[in-house]
């Protein structure tokens, strides 16, 4: 049965496959509620070592009850399946590309571009809303946060921002990205957000539960289920600085997650093998640390740290 026919059914769940090419497909779950309503697309595993999202996707398939749902949920739990089994940081091993910046894809491109193309053509179309589940990669410590678009159409920005506000994470961060799975979706007029929970190539059941609750809050906002629970306060980050390594070297971060930093404070240093400082990073403004790299060895161009302010 094709996806469109599945979505027309009521009160049913499927474990299915999403076809990318004649020889490549991805696991897909489809859950149809008892009543009509909106369609939510949930994607996970764009980056192969961000485990909390993938486990949450699997858990949602098990826990969502069709009888209590209005509308449909499409879940793609393991988009970079090869990267997951290979423990590959950021990229799809087959072509060395980062799925989060190959959108829009190409029908005749490399495997990453083909995955992107298939998602645009066959998944976006059905979505009233899309959430892409990420976390820090295995070399990153990450605060729980949600990115929402500010450079899509006004209506799309507004729906996504309201959704972001509902999620129980510490920060909602304005994003101008346009070439990723969720961000290109917003350029195609689909309200979407990117959620970050977990990091360092680890996962805990409590993080999976946290991520699952975020999705339930979103589903409540979309009126697919009823889910009322107190949310903690959230800050909106309107300005972010993303520092990248300007040289290969040894990276010494001098901050911690969620720490307030003052303008001029040292955030970290890159040193050479002889322990001489090659580059020192200082805060450009008073702000909070959103995530940073914990790996000692970094190469030029690697992400080092992101901090932002309200
Ligand atoms: Zn990611």
Image (cartoon, grey):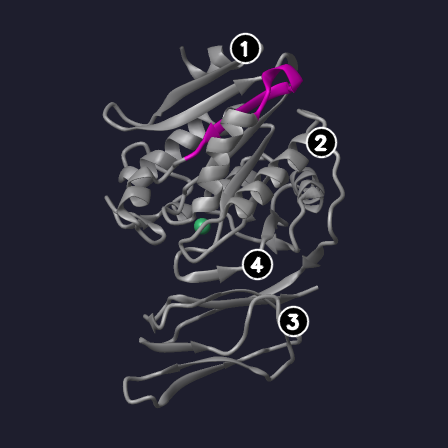
Look at the image and tell me in which quarter the N terminus lies.
top left
Residue labelled with disc 2: 227
**Residue 25, above or below 234:** above
Q: Secondary structure at mark 2?
A: loop
Left or right of 163? Residue 102 is left
Left or right of 45? Residue 61 is right
Depth check, front residue: 140 or 4: 140
Depth check, front residue: 204 or 9: 204
Residue 291 picture location, percent across and down:
52, 63
What segment is highlighted magenta in the picture?
A: 64-77
Residue contact at pointers 4 and 2, CB within 8 angstroms: no
User: Badge 2 local density, few (<14 within 10 Å), some, or many (20+)?
Assistant: some
Q: How far apart are the alpha carbons under marks 3 and 1?
A: 48 Å
Q: Earlier in the sequence, mark 2 or mark 1?
A: 1
Q: Earlier in the sequence, mark 4 or mark 1?
A: 1
Q: Earlier in the sequence, mark 3 or mark 1?
A: 1
Number of marks in the rendered image = 4
Q: Secondary structure at mark 1?
A: loop
Q: Earlier in the sequence, mark 4 or mark 2?
A: 4
Q: Which mark is residue 8?
A: 1
Would you say residue 251 sits in the magenta stretch? no
Q: How far apart are the alpha carbons under marks 4 and 2?
A: 24 Å
User: Residue placed at 38% from the left, 49% from the top?
Assistant: 49
Residue labelled with disc 3: 287
Residue 15 picture location, percent across and down:
41, 20
Q: How far apart are the alpha carbons under marks 3 and 2?
A: 33 Å
Residue 249 picture location, percent across and down:
32, 78
- Label 2 within 8 A of ligand 1 by Cβ: no
Left or right of 172? Residue 27 is left
Q: Secondary structure at mark 3?
A: strand
Residue labelled with disc 4: 143
Q: Earlier in the sequence, mark 3 or mark 2?
A: 2
């Amino acid at each position: 049965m094709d996806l469109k026919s599945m979505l027309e059914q009521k009160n049913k769940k499927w474990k299915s496959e999403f076809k990318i090419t004649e020889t490549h497909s991805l696991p897909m779950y489809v859950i149809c509620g008892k009543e009509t309503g909106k369609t939510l697309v949930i994607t996970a595993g764009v980056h192969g070592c961000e485990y909390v999202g993938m486990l949450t996707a699997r858990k949602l398939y098990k826990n969502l009850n069709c009888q209590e749902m209005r509308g449909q949920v499409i879940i793609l739990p393991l988009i970079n399946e090869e990267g997951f089994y290979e423990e590959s940081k950021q990229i799809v091993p087959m072509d060395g590309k980062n799925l989060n910046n190959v959108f829009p894809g190409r029908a005749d491109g490399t495997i990453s571009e083909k995955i992107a193309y298939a998602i645009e053509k066959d998944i976006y179309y059905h979505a009233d809303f899309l959430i892409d589940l990420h976390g820090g990669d295995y070399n990153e410590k990450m605060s729980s946060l949600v990115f929402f678009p500010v450079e899509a159409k006004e209506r799309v920005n507004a729906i996504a921002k309201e959704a972001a506000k509902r999620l129980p994470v510490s920060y909602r961060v304005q994003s101008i990205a346009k070439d990723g799975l969720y961000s290109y979706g917003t350029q195609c007029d689909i309200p979407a957000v990117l959620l970050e929970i977990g990091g360092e190539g680890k996962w805990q059941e409590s993080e999976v539960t946290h991520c699952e609750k975020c999705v339930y809050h979103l589903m409540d906002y979309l009126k697919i289920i009823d889910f009322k629970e107190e949310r903690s306060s959230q800050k909106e980050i309107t300005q972010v600085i993303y520092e990248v390594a300007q040289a290969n070297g040894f990276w010494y971060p001098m901050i911690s997650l969620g720490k307030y930093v003052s303008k001029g404070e040292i955030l970290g240093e890159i040193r050479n093998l002889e322990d001489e400082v090659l580059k020192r990073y200082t805060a450009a403004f008073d702000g909070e640390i959103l995530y940073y790299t914990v790996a000692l060895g970094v190469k030029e161009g690697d992400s080092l740290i992101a901090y932002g302010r309200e």
